[in-house]
Amino acid sequence: MLGIVGDSAAGKTTLTRGLVSLFGVENVSAICCDDYHRYNRKQRKEMGITALDPVCNYIDIMEQHFRMLRAGEPILKPVYNHGTGDFDPPEYVRPRRFVIVEGLLGFHSRAMRNCFDIKVYLNPSEPLRAEWKIKRDTTKRGYTREQVLAALEKRAPDSEAFIHPQRAHADLVVQFYPPPENSRETGAHLNARLVLRPTIPHPDFTPFLPIEGANGATPSLQMKLGRDAGKPADILEVSGSTTPEETTALRRRLREHLLPEDFNGQIPEGSIGIYYDGKEKRQSYPLALTQLLIAFHMIQAQEQLKGKTGAPAAGVAEPI
């Protein structure tokens, strides 16, 4: 089980969508824990409460459902409709080979955190997240720019109180940010900083370091020892400024390095690093590498489970 947590419009759904594409829909059960809101949009407005507040969510039911999925048992998951601001009929979810849970409060309690093999926190710079939220909510959810900015301001205290503290529980912290030479970049040429905490064993990137960029550009990958929340951690810097040719070659090399040979051959070249700029489909190398790294950990976690039991966990499909 993989948990992906981050603030609104931090890129959780984009990251999840790429992993589902990478593994195949028949092998992944992906759910959004934001479906567990206690109140609809109208009720929240009347109460003066935001969806980020744990009081506004069925935390106990989330804990129960996470444990059931972990045990290979199906759940009847609620469905929140962001278009209407109300609830649709519940959805029957059966855990497949991999389970991905993404949302605002996935690491809120110890009981929830204990269900995950890998915990990822998405931490884009705040100006970048604001631009992503404006673009998403105005193109897909029918809001005006002014309404989105007002919502960001209203939610800021709850973000600080309830969302940001969950970063401390992640195994991998992902931060996308604009390069210094182009502070207005919001898409394919964003850099990524991956904080690899020693809570899980990460792959060896030594064979790829340093990778020099073209014409003296910043190397595509740089690894350094740094500090995160006061503790030592490896930090992998991923440049978004590589050329398309370099990106394709490097992505292929990393894919072959990170994933088992029998699995690697089943991944289409264009299935990772995909995101939508409004309604336009684009591809990002730093996003692709992030997805590959997470996929590596998901496969490693499953191999460890098989090693303990001699077979896949109950309720989980046989490996492809």
Image: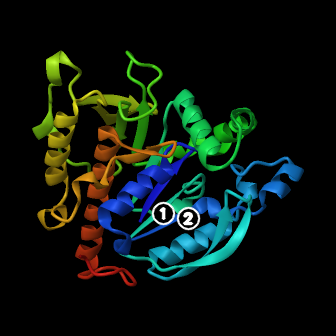
Dot 1 and dot 2 residues touching (CB under 8 Å):
yes
**Residue 119 visible here:** no
User: Callout 1: 10 Å neighbours few (<14), some, many (20+)?
Assistant: some
On the rendered image, what quadrant is the N terminus found in?
Answer: bottom left
Q: Residue furthest right?
A: 46
The percent coordinates of residue 282 (x first, y second) are 38, 43
Query: Which residue, given by chain and number where applicable, does mark 1 sit on?
Result: 114
Residue type highlighted by circle 2: Ala
Q: Total of numbered circles in the picture? A: 2
Residue sitting nearer the eye, 211 or 65: 211
Relative side of 275 to 221, left or right: right
Mark-to-mark CA distance, 1 and 2 = 5 Å
Provide the secondary structure element on which disc 1 rests. loop
Q: Quadrant of residue 245?
A: top left
**Residue 100 visible here:** yes
The percent coordinates of residue 252 (x first, y second) are 16, 48
Q: How is the image coloured?
A: rainbow
Residue type highlighted by circle 1: Asn
Residue 89 versus residue 274 in the image, above or below:
below
Provide the secondary structure element on which disc 2 rests. helix
User: Callout 2: 10 Å neighbours few (<14), some, many (20+)?
Assistant: some
Query: Which residue, given by chain and number where applicable, does mark 2 sit on?
Result: 111
- Residue depicted at x 21% and y 19%: 217
Residue sitting nearer the eye, 313 or 89: 89
